[in-house]
Image: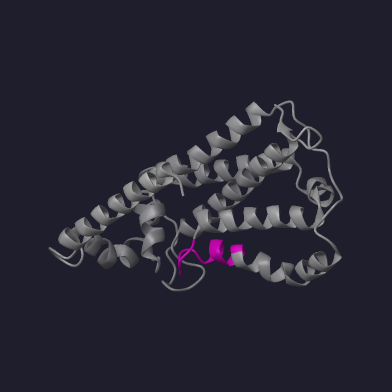
Amino acid sequence: MTRRNVFALLIALTGAGGLFAVLIVYGGTGEALPALAATFLERSIADSAAVNVVSTVLLDYRAFDTLGEATVIFASVTGVSALFVRAHLIPQSRGAGILVERAIGYLAAFFWLFPVYIVLFGHLSPGGGFQGGVALAVLIILLNVVYGTERGASILTTHRLHLFEDAGALAFLLIGTVGIIQGSAFLANLAAGFPGGVPGRLLSSGAIPLLNLAIGIKVASGLATIFYEFLASWDKAGARWKP
């Protein structure tokens, strides 16, 4: 190990130790839960009918901030697509081999259930649109790696992925506009007239499941688009990026 690596390691250990010391000194003082966190825990079900408090915070109390986070992903996809606008994906039939293809073929249904469950049940259990969308995008990338891009690119083309992402973003905005039409605020939930249902059931929590679905579609299609764009710009013959 060189001196430079040792010096970097010492800095990292010193920083981690200092952070740990601060957490020990200040983390155990005061109340167990801040007043704001305690309020969220007490009023979450009454305000949104969602059992998952995190979903209530992200898609009800601070839904406008979540819209900004989704906008960051949209801007990232737009920037990557503009950077590699002249790149074209050449479908490849080469995959990971017959054994891996057969194994993934048997397990693909279970792999699809995981992100779908995370998105649809995000208001009832840990998960949501962002987490489910990322899991779905990883699954799309995995299938392209295993079976080759010839199958994946023929079904989920970059153009279709862009349409899915635009549809997810538009759905998020339309759901938020309902609050204004009903005389409430943008991205309002139960105050906008969305039915709360029975807390703990699938059909509950007003607009939160709809927002999770819109975000899941948008995030999955956006990240998959970035994968295709980078893959299209890769010159395998010269092993370099070419915009």
Q: x and y percent of residue 40 in the render? A: 27, 61
Q: Residue at x 83, y 46 (%)?
A: 154
Which of the 4 image quarters holds residue 45?
bottom left
Q: Please, which residue is most extreme toward the front here? A: 2
Left or right of 16? Residue 108 is right
Q: Is residue 2 magenta?
A: no
Q: x and y percent of residue 89 in the render? A: 79, 37
Left or right of 111? Residue 41 is left
Q: Considering the image in quadrants, where does the C terminus appear?
A: top right
* Viewer-proximal residue among 50 and 181: 50
Q: Is residue 122 magenta?
A: yes
Left or right of 132? Residue 99 is right
Q: Please, which residue is most extreme toward the left here? A: 30
Which of the 4 image quarters holds residue 126?
bottom left
Q: Residue at x 49, y 47 (%)?
A: 175
* Viewer-proximal residue among 110 and 182: 110
Asked if 166 appears above or below 126 in the picture, the reply is: above
Q: x and y percent of residue 130 in the render? A: 51, 53
Asked if 56 appears above or below 102 in the picture, the reply is: above
Q: Residue at x 59, y 36 (%)?
A: 77
Q: Residue at x 75, y 30 (%)?
A: 87
Stretch in magenta: 115-127
